[in-house]
Image: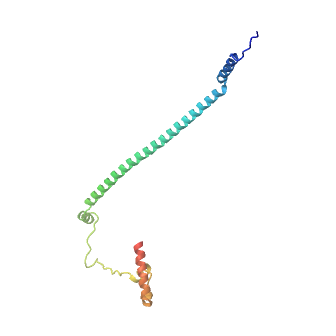
């Protein structure tokens, strides 16, 4: 009797395929290189974010320092202004008309004018108002004589323009 060759139960062929499949991922150097590149890119991005955050924090520190200096200068300014007003008040208190009159008479040798001989009166004339009004207004005397309505309209426009200014 012939013995049947049963190759359906031969598992040796499958064992070799499994060994080949297991050995391929372990021996693949490409995956290791990719992992190193990913670590380098992650490291570079972390360093970039760290450097950027240090830069931003340093700028905020600089802004805070400038604001602190401004506040100190404002305090100094207010104290100097107060001191200046105090000194002006003291100056005004120290200069009275009586002390000024005494110093003028005693130290500088000044005297009151003699009413009959040393008094001179000056006649001051007022400037003509018509010249001033012509410069500031749009109308003049000729406009009033020719047409009072045009002059009145110009006067109203002039008043409106003065209010707007």
Task: Decide if residue 129 is on the left or right side of residue 55.
Answer: left
In the image, is residue 31 above or below residue 135? above
Check the image and name the residue furthest to the top.
1
Say whether residue 128 is visible. no
Measuring from the top left, give residue 112's x and y in whole percent: 25, 72
In the image, is residue 71 above or below residue 10? below
Q: Nearer the viewer, residue 49 or 106?
A: 49
Give the residue at x 44% y 87%. 143
Check the image and name the residue furthest to the front.
1
Q: Nearer the viewer, residue 63 or 16?
A: 16
In the image, is residue 110 above or below residue 64? below
Say whether residue 147 is visible. yes
Q: Nearer the viewer, residue 119 or 95?
A: 95
Task: Decide if residue 63 is on the left or right side of residue 33.
Answer: left
Give the residue at x 45% y 90%. 146
- On-image quarter of the N terminus: top right
Image quadrant assignment for residue 106: bottom left
Q: How many marks?
A: 0
Q: Nearer the viewer, residue 119 or 98?
A: 98
């Amino acid at each position: 009797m012939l013995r049947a060759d049963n190759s359906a139960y031969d598992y040796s062929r499958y064992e070799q395929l499994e060994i080949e499949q297991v050995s391929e991922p372990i021996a693949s150097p490409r995956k290791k290189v990719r992992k190193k590149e990913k670590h380098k890119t992650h490291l570079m991005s972390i360093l970039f974010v760290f450097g950027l955050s240090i830069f931003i924090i340093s700028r905020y520190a600089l802004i805070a320092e400038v604001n602190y200096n401004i506040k100190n200068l404002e305090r100094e300014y207010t104290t100097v202004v107060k001191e200046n007003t105090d000194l002006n008040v003291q100056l005004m208190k120290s200069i009275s008309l009586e002390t000024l009159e005494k110093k003028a008479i005693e130290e500088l040798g000044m005297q009151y004018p003699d009413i009959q001989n040393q008094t001179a009166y000056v006649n001051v004339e007022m400037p003509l108002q018509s010249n001033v009004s012509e410069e500031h207004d749009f109308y003049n005397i000729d406009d009033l004589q020719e047409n009072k309505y045009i002059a009145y309209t110009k006067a109203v426009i002039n008043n409106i323009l003065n209010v707007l200014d």
